């Protein structure tokens, strides 16, 4: 097996899959106009995607172990490509909503399976580097993928990005069929999966990490999901003109992820993550509540996304520290909290937008990180020594 080719292919898949989850942000206004719904209602497309994703990401581990990594990868990418391509031709909002459920279910199969496949073919000394590569490529979806969606939609309409990304996913699925390791064969295993979930749920520190991550991802997705709509509605930008702002804000995800590598080794990391989240929440409130210039809004959004992004990689590292031989289970459960945070950010953010405008979205995001700070202070600080 050509390991470099395999890792490159897996990284591309992670980039495309993550782009699919974030691509709706610059399209919400156009989708609302196309189907005669409000922007808040269009935001529920992201909510159902995240909900379906959460179901898939937490349950795919046993399937991958039973049927093999290659089968899961090819199946997931194939159904994902079909659902994305079909979305380009959705005649009604209801049909598009149903297709996004399929998108979430199939897309959620890829990240956990990819991590497991990389662990299968890399020696322990190189796994951290390999995982870092995958996460870096996934983070680039916010820097490159989402702005590209905005540019393509501006040139050809909202349906064209679905055609482009769906086609790329189909090519990726075919390449996975030919290049994914064929030597992997699922062994006869009798892992007590329910017991593993119970084991992790019984760890106080993990429960706190799970809750804090969920709340911070609500704030992250609440801010990012409605940023493009805010720039279009309040500052008069076109869909294409949001490309550069979204790319700049997406850099915050990369910066936050790298910063997490420094934070995770600190003795008082729970307090540092809480402080970062609060700073991000305050920035989110500021950008949605005050009459800034368009680029001033982008600058504040960059600060918000950067600080809020510190938490997720930190919680991931902590979870692998305390999970023993149930690391995959811990990662899957944390990934599910990630996606459920996406549901909360998109759905509740849309509800607050409908009730009181964009400023209420800012208050909502700040409230979420305030709750996460309480969880971190009382739930994780006491358990630091156990890690």
Image (spheres, grey):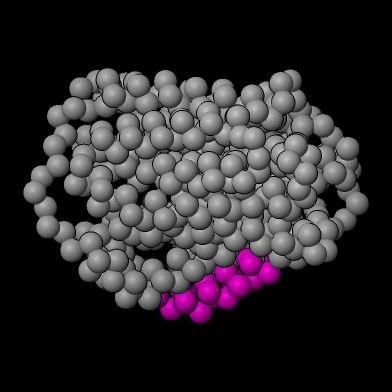
Q: How many marks?
A: 0
Left or right: residue 144 compared with residue 169: right
Along the viewing direction, whichever of 79 and 233 lies nearer the viewer: 79
Q: Residue furthest left?
A: 188
Residue occupying the point 37% across, 26% down: 173
Q: Is residue 84 magenta?
A: no
The quarter of the picture where the N terminus appears is top left
Left or right: residue 40 compared with residue 63: right
Name which quarter of the figure residue 283 lies in: bottom right
Q: Is residue 371 magenta?
A: yes
Along the viewing direction, whichever of 360 and 83 lies nearer the viewer: 83
Residue 26 to residue 9: above or below: below
What is the span of residues highlighted in magenta in the rendered image?
A: 366-386
Residue occupying the point 77% across, 58% down: 353
Left or right: residue 239 compared with residue 165: right
Residue occupying the point 51% across, 59% down: 340
Task: Tell me if I can see residue 385 in this picture.
Answer: no
Task: Tell me if I can see residue 48 in this picture.
Answer: yes
Q: Position of residue 64 (x, y in %)?
A: 25, 45
Q: Identify the main secondary structure in magenta.
A: helix
Q: Position of residue 359 (x, y in %)?
A: 82, 60
Residue occupying the point 37% across, 44% down: 109
Name which quarter of the figure residue 5 lies in: top left
Name which quarter of the figure residue 280 lies in: bottom right
Q: Position of residue 31 (x, y in %)?
A: 72, 39
Q: Position of residue 279 (x, y in %)?
A: 68, 60
The quarter of the picture where the C terminus appears is bottom left
Along the viewing direction, whichever of 227 and 68 lies nearer the viewer: 68
């Amino acid at each position: 097996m050509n390991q470099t080719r395999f890792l490159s292919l897996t990284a591309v898949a992670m980039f495309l899959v993550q782009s699919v989850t974030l691509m709706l942000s610059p399209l919400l206004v156009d989708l609302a106009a196309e189907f005669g719904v409000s922007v808040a209602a269009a935001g529920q497309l992201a909510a159902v995607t995240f909900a379906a994703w959460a179901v898939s990401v937490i349950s795919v581990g046993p399937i991958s172990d039973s049927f093999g990594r290659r089968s899961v990868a090819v199946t997931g990418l194939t159904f994902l490509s079909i659902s994305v391509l079909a979305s380009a031709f959705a005649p009604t909002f209801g049909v598009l909503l149903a297709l996004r459920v399929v998108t979430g279910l199939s897309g959620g199969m890829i990240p956990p399976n990819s991590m497991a496949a990389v662990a299968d073919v890399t020696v322990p000394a190189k796994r951290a580097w390999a995982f870092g590569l995958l996460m870096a490529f996934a983070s680039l979806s916010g820097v490159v993928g989402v702005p590209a969606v905005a540019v393509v939609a501006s040139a050809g309409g909202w349906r064209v990005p679905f055609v482009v990304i769906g086609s790329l996913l189909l090519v990726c699925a075919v390449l996975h069929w030919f290049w994914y390791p064929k030597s992997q064969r699922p062994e006869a295993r009798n892992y007590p999966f329910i017991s593993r979930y119970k084991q992790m749920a019984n760890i106080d520190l993990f429960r706190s990490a799970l809750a804090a991550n969920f709340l911070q991802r609500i704030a992250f997705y609440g801010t990012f999901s409605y940023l493009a709509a805010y720039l279009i509605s309040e500052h008069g930008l076109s869909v294409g003109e949001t490309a550069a702002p979204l790319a700049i804000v997406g850099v915050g995800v990369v910066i936050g992820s790298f910063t997490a590598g420094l934070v995770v080794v600190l003795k008082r990391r729970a307090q540092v993550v809480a402080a970062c989240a609060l700073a991000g929440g305050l920035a989110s409130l500021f950008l949605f509540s005050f009459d800034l210039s368009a680029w001033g809004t982008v600058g504040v959004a960059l600060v918000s996304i950067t600080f809020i992004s510190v938490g997720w990689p930190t919680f991931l590292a902590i979870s692998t520290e305390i999970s023993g031989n149930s690391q995959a289970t811990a990662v899957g459960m944390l990934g599910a909290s990630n996606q459920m945070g996406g549901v909360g950010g998109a759905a509740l953010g849309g509800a607050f937008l409908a009730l009181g405008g964009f400023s209420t979205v800012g208050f909502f995001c700040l409230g979420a990180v305030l709750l996460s700070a309480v969880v971190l202070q009382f739930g994780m600080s006491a358990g630091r020594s156990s890690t």
